[in-house]
Image (cartoon, grey):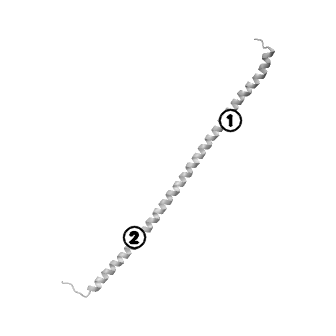
Amino acid sequence: MILSEKNVSRLTVLLPSFSILVLSVILTYAIISYQNFFLEKEFEEDKNSYIKNQKSIIQNEVSKIFDLIDFKNKVIQIRLQKKVENEMKSFYSIVESVYLTYKDTKTKE
């Protein structure tokens, strides 16, 4: 097959155009693949950072709740202790009153 001048001129125009088109497709694919890889990596880093952040926030909230429960328990314990002390004072007062009222009376023995 002999190449004529007409075919050669077509080849000189079409071959570089076709080569540029193929090269452009390959470069576009490579750029998109690289960007996809980079975005997936960044997404994983952001996801891990977010999970770590949320975990820390939850741990802090749970710690605050435990501290609040401890505080409430201490307050309740102090209030109960004061109530018991007041009840005991009242009891001793009643016992002393009864004793003073009946201390001079003798029992039937």
Residue 37 placement (x, y as % from top left)? 63, 38
- The answer to which quarter of the image holds residue 28 is top right
- 84 to the left or right of 99: right
Q: Percent from the top left, x then y, of residue 56?
A: 54, 54
- Mark 2, secondary structure of its residue: helix
Bin the neighbour count of mark 2 within 10 Å (Cα to Cα): few under 14, some 14-19, many 20 and up: few
| Residue 97 in the image: above or below residue 18 | below
Which image quarter holds the N terminus? Answer: top right
Report the Cα–Cα distance between label 1 and label 2. 73 Å
- Which residue is denoted by mark 1 in the rendering? 31
Q: Residue at x 66, y 38 (%)?
A: 35
Q: Name which residue lies at 80% across and 19% down.
A: 9
Residue sitting at the far left: 109
Q: Is residue 1 left or right of residue 78?
A: right
Q: Which residue is mark 2?
A: 80
State left or right for residue 2 relative to residue 104: right
Q: Residue at x 54, y 51 (%)?
A: 54
Q: Do labels 1 and 2 touch, CB within 8 Å?
A: no
Q: Secondary structure at mark 1?
A: helix
Residue lying farthest to the bottom in this orientation: 104
Q: Quadrant of residue 16?
A: top right
Quadrant where the C terminus is found in the figure: bottom left
Q: What amino acid type should be assigned to the residue bearing mark 1?
A: Ile
Q: Residue furthest right?
A: 5
